[in-house]
Amino acid sequence: MSFIECHNLSKDYPGQSALDKISVHLNQGEFVALEGVSGSGKSTLLALIGLLDRPTRGDVFIDGCSTHKLGLGRRCRLRNRYFGFVFQQFHLIGDLNVAENVALPLRYSGLPRHQWRNRVMEYLDKVGLADRENAYPGELSGGQQQRVAIARALVAEPRFLLADEPTGNLDSHTARQIIVLFQTLHQEGMGLLMATHNPDYAALAQRRLRLLDGRLQPNTP
Ligand SMILES: Nc1ncnc2c1ncn2[C@@H]1O[C@H](COP(=O)(O)OP(=O)(O)OP(=O)(O)O)[C@@H](O)[C@H]1O
Ligand SMILES: [Mg+2]
């Protein structure tokens, strides 16, 4: 069984279907790009796979476990155990500084508290923001906020990263550095599903999935 299996996933919003019968498997450690025009359903699919939202119909299996009947607590535990998220809108907490934002996932990771600071600084350094640990999100540029969000997604060393346009707000030089970081982590065994509008970055993936009007396009197994 694959690490992530989507079985006939559909998501309806009032008056509209955002996803329609998506069936796709993602293997442990795989690097997959998720493409499609704006509104095609990329963020919706990432939210369903990451157990942040529930499908209207269908089921997501994570590591062989059906999730559709699971309660909130078990879904949270699965999510914290396996996934890191980079949200399209960052979702940084404005009253917490950079280091505190990045440390958030460590609460659920089992890493002893005295090791948090080193781990946080390691990942802030990887995204080039070690010197801004005390800044607040409101004091940072959009690209810097995105890099904080990336450090936060990676800090607990997730088995699978779900990244929603992680380079959308970055200049091309910084974007490249982040993609190289993702490639390195992928080579070390991390899986990655990355929504992107950039065909050059999508081409680096082992597989490309393309959504159109909430449906997976053929030739994307
Ligand atoms: N909470 C919501 N309520 C109602 N409709 C929604 C909601 N979230 C998404 N949609 C609709 O579902 C469809 C898919 O949206 P989604 O955000 O998944 O697209 P996307 O591919 O991520 O687009 P983008 O590239 O602009 O980020 C869109 O038509 C959108 O309007
Ligand atoms: Mg989106």
Image (spheres, rainbow, N blue to C red):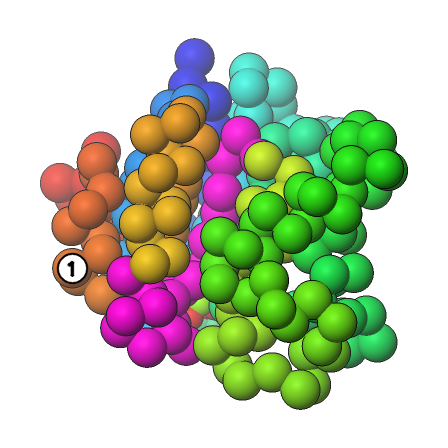
- Residue 36 x, y percent position in the rendering: 27, 62
**Which residue is tagged 1?**
200
Q: Identify the residue shown where x is 31% and y is 49%.
A: 180
Which of 28 and 140 lies nearest the eye of the viewer?
Answer: 140
Q: Residues within 10 Å of mark 1 (few under 14, many from 20)?
A: few
Q: x and y percent of residue 163 in the render?
A: 46, 53
- Quarter holding the N terminus is top left
When asked about the image quadrant of residue 132, the answer is bottom right
Residue 153 seen: no
Secondary element at tag 1: helix
At label 1, which amino acid type do we have? Asp
Furthest-top residue in this view: 1
Give 148 or 216, whichever is nearer the viewer. Answer: 148
Q: Is 60 in the magenta?
A: no
| Residue positioned 68% across, 30% down in the render | 81
- Tell me the magenta residue range: 158-176
Residue at image position (61%, 19%) is: 65
Q: In which quadrant of the rendered view does residue 170 lie?
A: bottom left
Report whether 174 appears left or right of 134.
left
Relative to residue 138, is residue 93 depicted above or below?
A: above
